[in-house]
Image: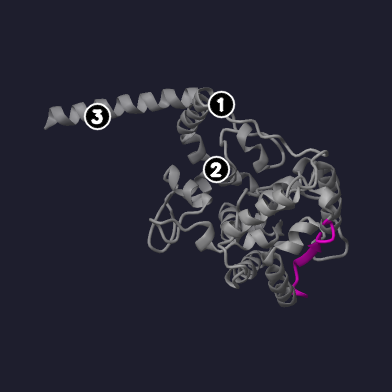
């Protein structure tokens, strides 16, 4: 027995030394992002590689007493509001964009909870959550996340919770194994795994070169009638095919607003536009408008809650596709958002 214990101790010591060497290599090889503004669009250039992983592992930086504008939503929030540009227009707060492509309301609510869990009570009182809303954000969980083998399915953020053991899955939902205050230490400890992920991804690119995808440009033309039909068919399938939105995601948004307000934070709900041809042809847009009007009436007059409508910015020529604004148009969106954030007096006036 003594020999077995001695061998186990030697093996454990060897593994610790090996892991220490891996840390010594990975930490300098994978420096944490040092930019002033968190931006999930920069995920591919960071150790985190993907938007959900970037948002989940990098959120500890939001535990500060600075006024913070934290942008949440889907890819049109990423394309529409660049933090560096907004920062110059909103000098009274740090601007962070943690939007995630393909997010629905469930994932936005999760992101709010994940931010709040790493913040002190003081830091929470300096949050302004800017949530970009449109019909795609209210895709039903059964259409967006359910899978044949798991009901409900994991969101992209759930996958990151479980990937490195920060949380464990239970019948009552995710349970944190790592105290939120230790998040940054945990990120440091998993750096060797992040490095392996990065090397595997880069090797895959060499073996299977990806087809280049052009970035949105000012020259992108209004889609042809055939292409418009393809876009509409995609969203019909993405939303589940019912032609209408359920009430549940709008209830979830109201509950998320309540959660933020209970911590002393503030909320700006931004009604995002679609190109005119898309809005007029989609039954989900009409359903969204009915639910959205009811939610505005429900939240009207609430302290710390404000609305910004960009629905009038719907010229087809201003979009690079069926959802995302061209860069020059994003500049105009940024100016309008900055005006709402800087409004004085008002529920969002920066303290």
**Residue at 76% of width from left, 45% of height from top?**
320
Q: Is 140 or 185 nearer to us in this picture? A: 140
Q: Residue 138: which quarter of the image?
A: bottom right
User: Relative to 112, does residue 223 appear above or below in the rendering?
Assistant: above
Q: Residue 209: which quarter of the image?
A: top right
According to the image, label 2 marks what residue?
53
Question: Marks 3 and 2: which is nearer the front?
Answer: 2
Q: Is 20 or 331 nearer to us in this picture? A: 331
Quadrant location, the N terminus:
top left
Report whether residue 273 is seen.
no
Q: Give residue 193's position: percent from left, percent from top.
A: 45, 33
**Does residue 266 show up magenta in the picture?**
no
- Label 3 to label 2: alpha-carbon separation: 35 Å
Q: Give residue 292's position: percent from left, percent from top.
A: 71, 70
User: Relative to 12, does residue 226 appear above or below in the rendering?
Assistant: below
Magenta segment: 300-314
């Amino acid at each position: 027995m003594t020999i077995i214990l001695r061998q186990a101790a030697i093996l454990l010591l060897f593994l610790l030394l090996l892991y220490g060497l891996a840390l010594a290599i990975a930490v300098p090889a994978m420096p944490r992002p040092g930019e002033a503004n968190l931006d999930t669009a920069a995920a591919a250039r960071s150790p985190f590689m993907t938007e959900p992983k970037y948002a989940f592992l990098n959120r500890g930086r939001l535990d500060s007493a600075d006024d913070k504008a934290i942008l949440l939503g889907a890819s049109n929030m990423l394309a529409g509001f660049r933090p560096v540009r907004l920062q110059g227009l909103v000098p009274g707060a740090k601007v962070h964009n943690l939007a995630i492509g393909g997010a629905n309301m469930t994932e936005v609510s999760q992101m709010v909870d994940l931010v709040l869990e790493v913040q002190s009570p003081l830091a929470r009182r300096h949050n302004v959550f800017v949530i970009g809303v449109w019909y795609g954000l209210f895709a039903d969980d059964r259409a967006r996340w359910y899978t044949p083998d798991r009901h409900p399915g994991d969101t992209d953020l759930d996958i990151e919770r479980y990937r490195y053991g920060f949380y464990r899955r239970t019948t009552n939902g995710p349970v944190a194994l790592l105290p939120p205050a230790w998040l940054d230490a945990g990120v440091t400890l998993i750096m060797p795994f992040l490095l392996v992920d990065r090397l595997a991804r880069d090797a895959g690119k060499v073996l299977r070169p990806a087809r280049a995808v052009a970035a949105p440009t000012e020259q992108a033309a209004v889609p042809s009638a055939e292409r418009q039909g393809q876009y509409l068919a995609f969203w019909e399938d993405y939303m589940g095919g019912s032609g209408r939105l359920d009430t549940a995601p709008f209830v979830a948004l109201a509950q998320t607003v309540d959660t933020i307000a209970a911590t002393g934070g503030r909320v700006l709900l931004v009604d995002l536009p679609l190109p005119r041809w898309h809005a007029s042809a989609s039954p989900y847009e009409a359903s969204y408008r009915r639910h959205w009007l009811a939610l505005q009436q429900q939240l009207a007059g609430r302290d710390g809650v404000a609305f910004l409508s960009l629905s009038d910015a719907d010229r087809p020529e201003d979009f690079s596709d069926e959802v995302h604004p061209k860069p020059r148009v994003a500049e105009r969106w940024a100016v309008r958002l900055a005006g709402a954030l800087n409004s004085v007096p008002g529920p969002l006036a920066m303290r």
